[in-house]
Image (cartoon, grey):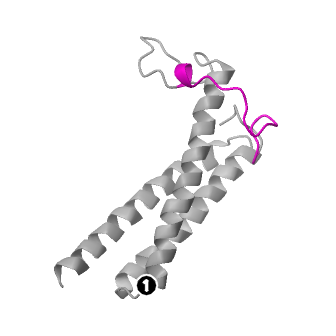
């Protein structure tokens, strides 16, 4: 995250210099250190910038799903889980931005991971309730 410390730009640019090939090399051998010891700045920027693109996609896809479910007539359980999911999505994005602004303190970083797990759990729960409702038809 510290490769792109500013928001909404990254290193003051909308499209910074990136090295996607080095950033997404799956096997680096023994002794790899991901705390700044192996990746070049351009590779670290590629990883973080890709994370931001993924977060933007999640905002539109998960957010759109939550809003669509709230606007359609669905069982009350689905609406409740949709509201929780949307709240977690907003919290997750807020924590991501706060991590950048505060230069990645461990409490915010751990919270960002924890809310990501809860967001995934809310999507699994939503899937369960939707499938249960479809089976009852």
Residue placed under numbered mark 1 in the picture: 72
Element under disc 1 = loop
**Residue at the limit of the structure toward the right, as seen here:** 12
Q: Residues within 10 Å of mark 1 (few under 14, many from 20)?
A: few
Q: Say which of 99 and 58 sits in front.
A: 58
Q: Quadrant of the C terminus?
A: bottom left
In this rendering, the answer to whether 33 lies above or below 78 is above
Left-right relation of 67 to 4: left
In this rendering, the answer to whether 103 lies above or below 57 is above
Left-right relation of 114 to 45: left
* Image point (76%, 47%), residue name: 101
Left-right relation of 1 to 136: right
In this rendering, the answer to whether 36 lies above or below 88 is above
* Image point (39%, 63%), residue name: 123
Q: Position of residue 67 (x, y in %)?
A: 51, 75
Q: Say which of 99 and 22 sits in front.
A: 22
Q: State the extent of the magenta-drawn residues as a range.
A: 7-23
**The magenta stretch spans residue 24:** no
Q: Position of residue 7 (x, y in %)?
A: 76, 46
Count the marks: 1
* Image point (17%, 78%), residue name: 135
Identify the main secondary structure in magenta: loop
**Residue at the limit of the structure toward the front, as seen here:** 15
Q: Say which of 2 and 137 sits in front.
A: 137
Q: Position of residue 70 (x, y in %)?
A: 47, 81
Query: Can the viewer see residue 83?
Result: no
């Amino acid at each position: 995250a510290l490769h792109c410390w500013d928001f909404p730009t990254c290193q003051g640019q909308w499209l910074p210099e990136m090295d996607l090939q080095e950033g997404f090399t799956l096997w680096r051998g023994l002794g790899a250190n991901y705390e700044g010891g192996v990746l070049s700045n351009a590779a670290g920027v590629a990883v973080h910038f890709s994370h931001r693109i993924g977060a933007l996609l999640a905002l539109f896809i998960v957010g759109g799903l939550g809003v669509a479910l709230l606007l359609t007539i669905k069982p009350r359980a689905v609406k409740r889980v949709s509201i929780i999911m949307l709240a977690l999505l907003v919290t997750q994005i807020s924590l991501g931005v706060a991590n950048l602004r505060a230069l990645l303190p461990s409490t915010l970083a751990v919270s960002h991971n924890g809310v990501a797990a809860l967001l995934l759990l809310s999507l699994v729960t939503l899937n369960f309730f939707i499938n249960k409702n479809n089976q009852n038809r």
